[in-house]
Each structure stands twice: as C-alpha cells, then as structure tokens.
Amino acid sequence: MEGSMKFLFCSMGNIAQRHFRNLKTLLPDCEIDVVCSTRTNYRIFDNELNISYINDLKKVYNIDKVYHDLDEALLNKYDAAFVCSLPPERIDIATDLAEQGVNLFIEKPLSNNLDQVYKLQEIVEEKGLICTFGFQMRFHPVFQKLKNMVDNKEFGEVYRIEALHSNNIHNWTKGRNLKKHFYALNKENGGGVLFSQIHEIDYLTYLFGKHYPISAIYGNWLNTEVEDNITILSNLESEDRCIPIIINLDFLSPIPRRDLTIYGMNKTESFNLLPHSSEEWNNLFLDEMKAFLNLLDVEKDSRLATLEDGIASLEYVMDIKDNFMKVNI
C-alpha cells in the first residue's frame, strides 16, 4: 500500500479504540481524525477491557484532529471511515459518509432496525464504494479448517448444527453500571443479546449458507429492558430436506463458553471458539483490519463481511423480533 492514508473514526468507544490501535500497528504513518462527543472525561480501554479516564484523547492516541461535528470533518478527504457509534446512530452516519464517497468499515450490527438500510445499499452500489462489517469471528482459525471440512464433505450429510455463545456480561463491563452505561442492556441504544451476539448468526451463514428462523424462546433474568438470553431454532434449507440449526445466546453464564457442534452422518465434532488469551482474541481483529486495508488496495479476502452480509444478519434478527418477540419484556 503506497503513500500516506487518511482515516476517520466516528466514535471512540471500546471497539473503536481496538480498531484504532490495530490500524496504527499496521499503518503507523497514517493520519487519523476522530469525530466524537464533547466530554470532560473519556473512557480509555485496553485489550483487557481495563478502563481509565482522561480529559484529552490526544494524550493517549496519536490523533491528528478531533471533531465534534461530522459535517466539519467531511470538509476533508478520507480513504475510509470506521463507523463505531451506537447502533441507532450508525446508519445515518454511514449514509452521510457514503454520500461523500467515503469507503466504510461499519461495526456490527448495521442498525437496530431496517429503516434507511436499503438506501445506504443503493448509495454504496451507485458510487462503487467498499463497505464491510466488523464480523471478526470469520477470521477465527478454526473456521478455515471447518470450511475445508464442510466443502470436502468430511462430516458426510450434516443433519444438525448447534451454536452456543454464553458469557457473563459483568466480564465485559469492569464495574460499570450495567443499566445506565452499557449499551448492550439498553433498548434505546440497540441492546439485547441478539444484537450484541449477532456474530453467531453471521458465521453460521458464512459457513453453511442462508438459514431462516422458525421459532425463538427468550427471557430476561437481569431485569433490564432487553432480552439477555435466547434460544433460536433456525432452518438451513438443502436441496431435499431441512437441517435444524439451534442457536443459544446469553449474557448470564459464570463460565464463558463459545462452541459449535456439527452433527454429520460420517462424524460429529465440537469446536471450542473461545480465545486462549487476549492476544489471540485481538488477532482476529488484527487479521480483519489487514484484510480491510488490503481490500482498499483491491486485494479481496472472502472472509470479510460485505454490505449484503451485514444486511442479511440484521434482517434475520429483525425477523425474530417481529415474529417471535411481540411481548414486551
């Protein structure tokens, strides 16, 4: 990749700071501007999710310029923008950027509803922009092995698939007030286990193809305004039969688990997807960042989630919310 590149970060929360560090690791000479709210105290996260507070982001990160207004930032030209704001804000920000011809990396999920999503898709296609999503689980080393196994029919006929992501939300928050300050438990900010753990929905599509929810059972054990656990029965359609996919997601377990089990006529195998260290976990994000930068240089990586992938996962979630979650929690 030749020449100095210029990027814009929209928001500087936990996930944005991780992307920022990885981008600077790969392109130490690039220029980065930030658009974020005006605060007296900014939360600074490290890869262990430890938090410190500071009143000036520039003292921690090598930021070229901090803006508090997107229109002002867009007086500049950027090679790409990272949209890491809260889910309800993402679609409007991404649309404004796309209208100015800026390539996009958008954190998952794309939004907390389908409003304006197809308008963004039209603009991206019309302008020929790059638009990808933060589905770093696609870069898990297990999945390359798995894809080869599935393609080579090592399992034989697959007749059931089970995915589990179970984690205690207190492990993410490091003492923050869950109901007040953590978006994942805030309905207005696009919270709930379905949005937060949408990775399982995406990687199952990536590995096996499109699947459709046919039922869901959910609950709220933390007494917040969103679901904190859900079990989904999904249908993977093959040529002549239906294959059930069972997806279990929750914020509750004291012992983290992230498993994928594939049941086949030739063999059944379970895969542990939990990282062994924070470095191993960050490597997924780092590999994703490498692939995105290579894509800007016209080197495509099939593991990157496209705009169509991001929309498909959101459509799946909204299908569940519209058809199986009518009752208010």
Image (cartoon, rainbow, N blue to C red):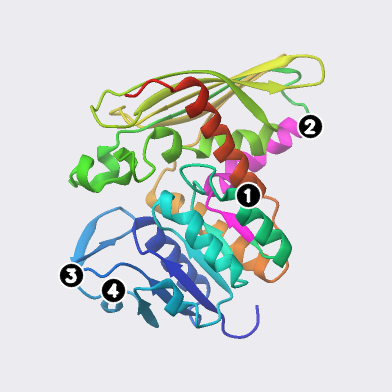
Measured from the top left, where is residue 264 in percent x and y? Answer: 69, 17
For residue 226, side relative to residue 215 (left or right): left
Looking at the rendered structure, the secondary structure element under dot 4 is helix
Any magenta on residue 143? yes
Is the residue 256 above or below the residue 12 in the image? above
Q: Give the labeled residue for mark 2.
A: 152
User: Residue placed at 20% from the left, 62% from the top?
Assistant: 52
Any magenta on residue 124? no
For residue 161, side relative to residue 81 (left or right): right
Measured from the top left, where is residue 164 in percent x and y? Answer: 47, 27
Q: Amino acid at mark 4?
A: Leu
Looking at the rendered structure, the secondary structure element under dot 3 is loop
- Is residue 305 visible to the viewer in this orientation of the structure? no
Q: Amino acid at mark 3?
A: Thr
Q: Amino acid at mark 2?
A: Asn
> Looking at the image, is mark 4 or mark 1 earlier in the sequence?
4
- Residue neighbourhood size for the residue with mark 1, other residues' Cα within 10 Å, grouped as few (<14), some (14–19), many (≥20): few
User: Residue placed at 32% from the left, 45% from the top?
Assistant: 183
Q: Give the labeled residue for mark 3.
A: 40
- Mark 2 vs mark 3, foreground winner is 3
**Tag 4 near tag 1, CB within 8 Å:** no
User: What residue range appears in magenta?
Assistant: 131-151
Residue furthest out toward the right: 239
Q: Give the labeled residue for mark 1.
A: 118
Q: Nearer the viewer, residue 62 or 280?
A: 62
